[in-house]
Image (tube, grey):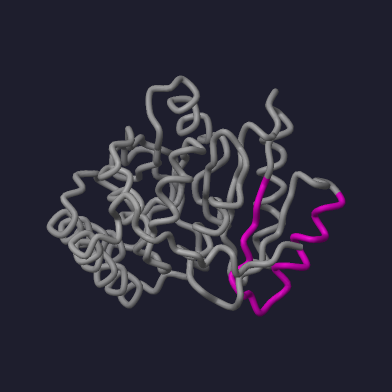
């Protein structure tokens, strides 16, 4: 059983996934523990899947490719990968590797030391760690989104949208089956569920660079996220996050290659 599982969602990432896998396995091969990498292909129409399969000549069974039934969204992809992962600690990050692998220790060490159950990277706690910034409009939209998020969820974290989050395995097994949101708004939802369940959460500053080619539309995507965040409160009211609630079954619809 691997110590660390890394889940990478991918949609039309043929130009970046090879470099990301190179960096990921360079990191894992420098560690003393075993690791696995799971790429979740979200209905890509390019050669993303082929690029991942070609990489297996280096990685062997340490690399798994999971295929979604079509383009279902980042949240859907993350849930599938997290529930398929077998590591003691499970980390997910974006295919553009906007946070470098050198930051992995920041989010897994507090879990390994049994101080926290979930540790997630933040771009807001130490702005000096940001190399290449997003556009001014993106940053302002993000700040407004944090305010709306707090209004509807009560989450006091400075940055829930950074795609660099690590979970203790048993925590992931408890949280992700209750995740309802398949789009980009899943990040605050899983933190909301985790807080409701009483898990220990830590937001920690990480290095981050804006990478061109983002799948996030500067206006449309944040508005969709805000609408999804508003559903979190409704899901709570209707009991979808309660113990004993019916788990989401979407992850059983995937196939592995």
- Residue at 80%, 46% in the rendered image: 59
Query: In this image, 114 relative to 157: left or right?
Result: right
- Residue at 57%, 55% in the rendered image: 81
Q: Is residue 40 magenta?
A: yes
Against 47, residue 174 (above or below) is above
The answer to which of 186 and 199 lies nearer the viewer is: 199
Q: Position of residue 114 (x, y in %)?
A: 43, 22
Part of the protein shown in magenta? 37-57
Q: Position of residue 32 (x, y in %)?
A: 70, 23
Q: Quadrant of residue 171?
A: top left
Query: In this image, 219 relative to 90: left or right?
Result: left
Q: Position of residue 125 (x, y in %)?
A: 28, 38
- Residue at 33%, 37% in the rendered image: 203
Q: Is residue 60 magenta?
A: no
Query: In this image, 249 relative to 254: left or right?
Result: left
Against 182, residue 85 (above or below) is above
Q: Residue furthest front?
A: 244
């Amino acid at each position: 059983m691997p110590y660390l599982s890394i889940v990478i969602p991918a949609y039309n990432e043929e130009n970046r996934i090879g470099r990301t896998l190179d960096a990921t396995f360079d990191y894992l091969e420098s560690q003393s523990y075993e690791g696995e990498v799971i790429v979740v292909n979200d209905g890509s129409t390019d050669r993303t899947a082929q690029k991942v399969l070609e990489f297996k000549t280096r990685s062997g069974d340490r690399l798994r490719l999971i295929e979604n039934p079509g383009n279902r969204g980042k949240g859907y992809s993350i849930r599938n990968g997290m529930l398929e992962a077998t590591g003691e600690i499970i980390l997910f990050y974006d295919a553009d590797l906007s946070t470098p692998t050198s930051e992995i220790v920041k989010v897994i060490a507090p879990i390994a030391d049994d101080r926290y159950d979930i540790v997630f990277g933040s771009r807001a706690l130490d702005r000096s760690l940001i190399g290449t910034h997003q556009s001014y409009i993106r940053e302002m939209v993000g700040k407004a989104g944090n305010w709306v998020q707090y209004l509807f969820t009560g989450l006091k974290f400075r940055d829930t949208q950074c795609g660099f989050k690590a979970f203790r395995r048993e925590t992931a097994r408890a949280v992700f089956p209750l995740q309802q949101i398949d789009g980009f708004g899943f990040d605050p939802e899983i933190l909301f569920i985790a807080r409701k369940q009483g898990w220990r959460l830590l937001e920690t500053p990480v290095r981050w660079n804006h990478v061109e080619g983002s799948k996030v539309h500067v206006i449309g995507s944040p508005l969709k996220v805000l609408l999804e965040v508003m559903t979190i409160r409704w899901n709570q009211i209707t009991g979808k996050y309660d113990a004993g609630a019916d788990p989401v079954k979407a992850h059983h619809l995937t196939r592995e290659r």
